[in-house]
Image (cartoon, grey):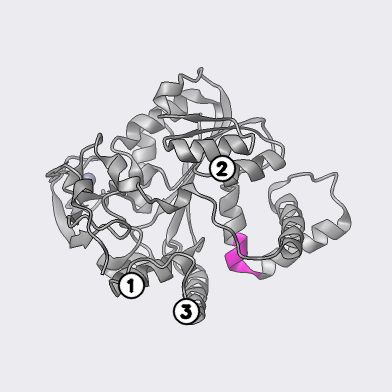
């Protein structure tokens, strides 16, 4: 049995109405435990009663000054190895650049024909392709300055730097910042607003699975819009509450992740949010990125056995890959079934 840590209980207040439209919310899922750190607290997910809105959120709402307690053992902030040896990693990295060149235009005129051909092999593996697309957040070549908000251990920034971007990062977790600095990445500790970036500073801002953690996501998007150059790109990802995973696993879906996920978005609600911050054209796709890990984690939650990160048995890994393949196939017919949403928009 997991140990409970009552000292880490998070103060929270009832949150009956919608952040986006003010309508009351109906309970969608009741009594969800924190799947990483069991404090004995239970959380609900509410869904906005306004059917044209579609926002979901955690209730009760954790107090902003208390939420750091929920990130004590958060997994995205340390380096997790692929578990493969050097030669395979080098071959993979060789192919990855070839793929990124073909798809996103990086090093187009400087790459050998062999590397371009090796890159094409990545197209044969939809799951790997989705991971690589997500590693660079779908950012095409062109432009110079790129900022990642909530950069964790800095893996995306390292790759984007390798692709020629002048990268900067902001991160709240001091341990993760220290990890980034040890890799010579330019990363500041703290919140975005505290950095006081100048107007029109960046060609690109990326945010991977951050927007759902924010108490006031609109304020962050307004700040991003201010610091983007005209025509600059915002690219972000978030879990999709219309997805196969949300439907199949119900309250056990990892994408709810209370109390860390404050708001849970659908393509419609995230579009409304982004537009409310002043952006006009919003492009949404849903993807199979890490859907296999989502499957394995949600299955652990469903069976109440604690998430077995990187310790899953082979049979479970196979089931995860089959689930991901089903999602890939289904996406051909139903565009919003992917577990992850990729949202991109430009400052006009
Ligand atoms: Zn609403």
Residue 245, image x, y percentages:
37, 67
Question: Compared to 18, does 306 lie above or below?
Answer: below
Residue 126 within the magenta-colored segment of the rendering: yes
Magenta part of the chain: 125-129
Residue 229, image x, y percentages:
56, 25
Q: Residue at x 59, y 48 (%)?
A: 138
Residue 154, which numbered label?
A: 2
- Residue that label 1 marks: 248
Residue 231, image x, y percentages:
57, 30
Q: Residue at x 79, y 63 (%)?
A: 118
Q: Are marks 1 and 2 in contact (CB under 8 Å)?
A: no
The disc, 3 or 1, on the residue closer to the chain's N-terminal end is: 1
Callout in the foreground (1, 2): 2
- Residue that label 3 marks: 319
Callout in the foreground (3, 1): 3
Which quarter holds ligand 1?
top left
For the residues marked 1 and 2, what is the alpha-carbon distance in whole angstroms?
A: 32 Å
Q: Residue at x 50, y 64 (%)?
A: 288
Question: Which quadrant, please, contains the N terminus?
Answer: bottom left
């Amino acid at each position: 049995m997991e140990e409970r840590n009552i000292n880490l209980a998070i103060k929270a207040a009832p949150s009956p109405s919608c952040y986006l439209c003010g309508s009351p919310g109906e309970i969608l899922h009741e009594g969800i435990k924190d799947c990483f750190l069991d404090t004995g607290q239970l959380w609900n997910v509410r869904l906005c009663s306004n059917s044209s809105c579609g926002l979901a959120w955690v209730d009760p709402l954790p107090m902003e000054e208390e939420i750091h307690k929920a990130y004590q053992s958060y997994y995205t902030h340390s380096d997790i190895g692929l578990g493969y040896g050097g030669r395979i990693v080098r071959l993979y990295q060789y192919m990855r650049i070839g793929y990124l060149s073909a798809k996103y235009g990086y090093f187009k005129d400087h790459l050998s024909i062999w590397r371009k051909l090796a890159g094409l092999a990545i197209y044969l593996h939809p799951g790997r392709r989705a991971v690589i697309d997500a590693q660079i957040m779908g950012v095409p070549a062109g432009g110079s300055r790129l900022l990642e908000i909530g950069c964790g251990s800095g893996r995306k920034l390292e790759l984007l730097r390798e692709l020629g971007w002048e990268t900067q990062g902001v991160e709240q977790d001091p341990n993760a910042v220290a990890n980034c600095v040890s890799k010579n990445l330019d990363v500041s500790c703290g919140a975005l607003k505290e950095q006081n970036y100048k107007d029109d500073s960046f060609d690109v801002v990326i945010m991977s699975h951050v927007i759902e953690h924010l108490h006031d996501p609109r304020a962050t998007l307004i700040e991003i819009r201010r610091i983007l150059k005209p025509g600059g790109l915002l690219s972000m990802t978030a879990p999709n509450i219309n997805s196969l995973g949300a439907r199949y696993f119900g309250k056990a879906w990892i994408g709810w992740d209370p109390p860390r996920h404050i708001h849970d978005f659908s393509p419609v609600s995230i579009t409304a949010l982004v537009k409310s911050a002043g952006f006009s054209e919003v492009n949404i796709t849903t993807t199979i990125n890490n859907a296999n890990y989502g499957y394995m984690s949600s299955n652990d939650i469903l069976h109440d056995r604690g998430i077995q990160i990187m310790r899953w048995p082979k049979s479970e890994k196979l089931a995860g890959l089959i689930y991901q393949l089903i999602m890939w196939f289904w996406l051909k017919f139903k565009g919003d079934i992917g577990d992850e949403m990729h949202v991109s928009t430009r400052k006009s």
